[in-house]
Amino acid sequence: MRALRVRVVGPSAKPPSVTRSLVRFVGLILAIIPLFAGFLPVLVDGRRRGLHDFLSGTVVLDELELVGH
């Protein structure tokens, strides 16, 4: 993520807490299990969030977007 210059942030535009990170990780596993079906929301969501982001309330932002927050 550092090479791509993106960050995962929570609702307050700060890094996610340990609990939120664990929920995101479990959600990621759940998104992968059914043939990556948990990533399908990325195709229709305006913020391009997958199942794991919906469950944890996080979003992945470009570092340039963080400057504007």
Image (cartoon, helix red, strand yellow):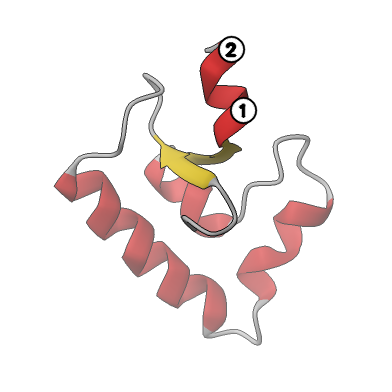
In the picture of the structure, the residue carrying the numbered disc 1 is: 64
Could you tell me if the residues under marks 1 and 2 are in contact, i.e. CB atoms within 8 Å? yes
Residue lying farthest to the front in this orientation: 3
Placement of 12 over or under 7, stated as above or below: above
Q: In this view, does 50 lie to the left or right of 23?
A: right
Compute the Cα span from label 1 to label 2.
7 Å
Q: Residue 49 carries which label?
A: none
Label 2 crowd (10 A; few <14 / some 14-19 / many >=20): few
Q: What element carries label 2?
A: helix
Image coords of residue 35 (percent x, y): 66, 87
In the depicted structure, whether residue 49 falls above or below residue 37: above
Q: Name the residue under label 2.
A: 68
Amino acid type, callout 2:
Gly
> Dot 1, crowdedness within 10 Å: few (<14), some or many (≥20)?
few
The image quadrant that residue 16 belongs to is top left
Q: Position of residue 66 (x, y in %)?
A: 52, 23
The residue at the point 62 percent across, 25 percent down is: 65
| 39 in relation to 44, above or below | below
Q: Which residue is drawn at 44% across and 43% down?
A: 8
In the image, residue 58 lies at what x, y percent? 45, 39
Q: In this view, does 49 lie above or below 12?
A: below
Residue in front for this viewpoint, 1 or 16: 1
Q: In this view, does 37 lie to the left or right of 17?
A: right
Which amino acid type is shown beneath numbered disc 1?
Answer: Leu
Q: Is mark 1 on a helix, strand or loop?
A: helix
Q: In which quarter of the image is residue 62?
A: top right
Q: Residue furthest left?
A: 18
Between 42 and 61, the one lying in front of the other is 61
